Image (spheres, rainbow, N blue to C red):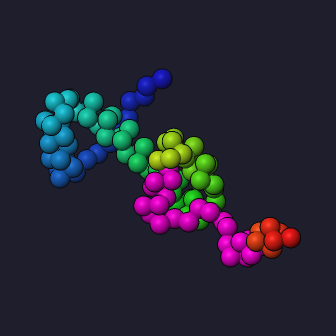
């Protein structure tokens, strides 16, 4: 169900919004809707990456939260230098010891 909202915008934002409207050849309402949807998608990704970095969620959880494919989240995490693998030197040594008998 759609709702109507009201927002106050400064002159500089209105000037930039007019540029968007002209570029997209869309009216003000449509331009604002599209910008808001885009911004919310971006926020979801950034928020998920932040939580992944803080180890609050897993890589799969971050992808789900951001509503993007897992491979896209892997690429983003790599780009942001986020270590999502909790496999350390002690884990490796333990596994090598188990494999060697």
In the picture, measured across the screen, residue 53 lies left or right of residue 8, that is right
In the picture, the quarter occupied by the C terminus is: bottom right
Residue at image x 38%, y 35%? 5
Residue extending farthest to the top is 1
Q: Is residue 72 above or below residue 89?
A: above
Considering every residue shown, the one lying at the far right of the view is: 101
Q: Is residue 48 visible?
A: yes
* 91 falls in the magenta region: yes
Q: Nearer the viewer, residue 59 or 1?
A: 59
Reply yes or no: does residue 10 show up in magenta: no
The image position of residue 68, as x and y in percent, is 49, 42
Please identify the quarter of the rendering in which residue 76 is found: bottom left
Instruction: State the residue in front, 99 or 92.
Output: 99
Which residues are drawn in magenta? 73-94
**Residue 6 locus on image (x, y percent):** 34, 37
The relative height of residue 79 versus residue 3 in the rendered view (above or below) is below
Q: Position of residue 71 (x, y in %)?
A: 50, 47
């Amino acid at each position: 169900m759609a709702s109507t909202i009201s927002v106050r915008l400064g002159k500089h934002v209105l000037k930039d919004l007019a540029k968007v409207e002209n570029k997209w050849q869309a009216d003000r309402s449509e331009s604002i809707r599209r910008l808001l949807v885009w911004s919310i998608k971006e926020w979801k990704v950034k928020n998920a990456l932040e939580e992944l970095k803080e180890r609050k969620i897993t890589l799969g959880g971050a992808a789900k939260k951001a509503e993007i494919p897992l491979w896209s989240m892997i690429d983003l995490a790599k780009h942001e230098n986020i270590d999502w693998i909790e496999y350390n030197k002690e884990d490796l040594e333990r596994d090598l010891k188990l494999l060697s008998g």
